[in-house]
Image (spheres, helix red, strand yellow):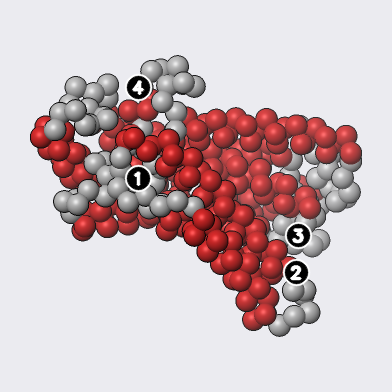
């Protein structure tokens, strides 16, 4: 990734559009990861309840409603 | 050369956020293992005693479960590590969007964002819907509790946003106490309305030990505090290092 905007504060419209898409994809992927830890019961991970059960203690201690 | 420099490319920031989050998540896992696991064990013992007395209840069967208790204790680190990485990445994303609008960062943005996340996404929801150990909570209401919890996280973040809005709306000429009062007012207004409007759940069994519940909740809150403090400090340190590295390499050529 070239540092096109690193030296000047002005923002290029094309760079902004590309950044927004990158940000959008990143936010979706990271939300999916957080969902996998905190709420998934096999619907997304396709591992049945295995990951859900594996991270049982983490969910409780992170304060997420579990059961 | 001003201390405030332009933000490095998004991916460079994102990688640092993910790394800070992963490390902070493992630290939070270590805290949870030491401070929280004894409480989880004690609560599961109570849950199993109740399940034996009344076999129809138990939503989770911890005896012939898919993952044994040792696996779940190890899975704690997987859960906090992955969750931390996700939160660190989201913090980095918010950091990039914020510092583009603010035209750079003086080194405080990452710390402020982590503090805002701790207050809005952890402490505000926790005081309304505190963490529950196994054996506390009615499995029949889990979907409702999950949705209201998530909504409360959003409302907590809105409350923090309202606080910063209040702070800025008073104007830079106003005395500091007035700006602080506007910030606290905006935050408390949204928080109080949310607490009143959102439903409450009273599902602690009558015979569940109060000290165990308190100790578990304290450990749970501590886990999140370690997580977000770690994310904030590590991310700020990594970004500080990165900005100085960029400033040092940029100087000779220009």
Q: Nearer the viewer, residue B78 or B202?
A: B202
- The earlier-in-sequence mark between 3 and 2 is 3
Q: Residue at x 70, y 34 (%)?
A: A24
Say whether residue B62 is visible: no
Residue holding disc 2: B169
Measured in 3D between alpha carbons, the distance from the residue under mark 3 to the one under mark 2, in whole angstroms, is 24 Å
Q: Secondary structure at mark 3?
A: loop
Q: Which residue lies under the disc numbered 4?
A: A50
Discs 4 and 1 share one subunit: yes
Q: How far from the left and from the top, in percent, is residue B150?
A: 51, 43
* Distance from the alpha carbon under mark 4 to that under mark 2: 50 Å
Q: Quadrant of residue A59?
A: top left
- The disc, 4 or 1, on the residue closer to the chain's N-terminal end is 4
- Chain where mark 3 sits: B
Q: Is residue B22 left or right of residue A23?
A: left
Residue picked out by circle 1: A61
Can you see residue B149? yes
Quick one: SS at disc 4?
helix
* Cα distance between the residues tagged 4 and 1: 18 Å
Q: Residue furthest left?
A: B53
Please state if B216 lies on the left or on the right of B24 as rendered: left
* Residue that label 3 marks: B4
Q: In the picture, which quadrant includes the N terminus of chain B? A: bottom right
Q: Are marks 3 and 1 on the same chain?
A: no
Residue at the spot 21% in from the left edge and 57% down from the top edge: B210
Foreground mark, 3 or 1, reads: 1
Q: Are marks 1 and 2 on the same chain?
A: no
Chain letter for the residue marked with disc 4 in the picture = A
Could you say where residue B179 lies in the image, as x and y percent from the top left? 68, 75
State the image coordinates of residue B231 (x, y, percent, origin top left).
Answer: 52, 50
Marks 3/1: CA–CA distance: 38 Å
Residues marked 3 and 2 touching at CB (< 8 Å): no
């Amino acid at each position: 990734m070239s540092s096109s905007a690193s030296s000047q504060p002005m923002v290029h419209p094309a760079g902004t559009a590309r950044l927004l898409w990158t940000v959008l994809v990143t936010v979706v992927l990271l939300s999916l990861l957080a969902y996998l830890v905190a709420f998934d019961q096999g619907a997304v991970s396709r591992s049945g309840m295995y990951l859900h059960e594996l991270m049982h203690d983490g969910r409780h201690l992170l304060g997420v409603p579990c059961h | 050369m001003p201390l405030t420099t332009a933000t490095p490319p998004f991916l460079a920031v994102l990688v640092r956020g993910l790394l800070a989050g992963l490390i902070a998540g493992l630290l939070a896992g270590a805290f949870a293992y030491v401070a929280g696991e004894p409480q989880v064990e004690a609560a599961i013992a109570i849950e199993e005693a109740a399940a034996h007395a009344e076999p129809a209840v138990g939503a989770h069967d911890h005896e012939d479960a898919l993952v044994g208790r040792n696996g779940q204790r190890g899975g704690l680190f997987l859960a906090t590590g992955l969750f931390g990485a996700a939160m660190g990445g989201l913090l980095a994303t918010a950091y990039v969007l914020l510092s583009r609008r603010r035209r750079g960062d003086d080194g405080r943005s990452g710390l402020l964002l982590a503090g805002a996340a701790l207050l809005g996404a952890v402490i505000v929801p926790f005081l309304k819907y505190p963490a529950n150990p196994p054996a506390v909570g009615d499995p029949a209401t889990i979907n409702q509790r999950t949705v209201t919890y998530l909504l409360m996280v959003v409302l907590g973040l809105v409350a923090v946003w309202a606080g910063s809005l209040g702070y800025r709306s008073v104007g830079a000429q106003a005395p500091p106490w007035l700006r602080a009062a506007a910030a606290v007012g905006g935050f408390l207004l949204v928080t109080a309305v949310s607490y009143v409007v959102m439903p409450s759940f009273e599902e602690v069994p009558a015979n569940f030990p109060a000290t165990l519940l308190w100790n578990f909740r304290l450990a749970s809150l501590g886990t999140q505090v370690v997580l977000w403090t770690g994310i904030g400090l590590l991310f700020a340190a990594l970004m500080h290092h990165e900005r100085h590295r960029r400033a040092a390499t940029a100087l000779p050529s220009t």
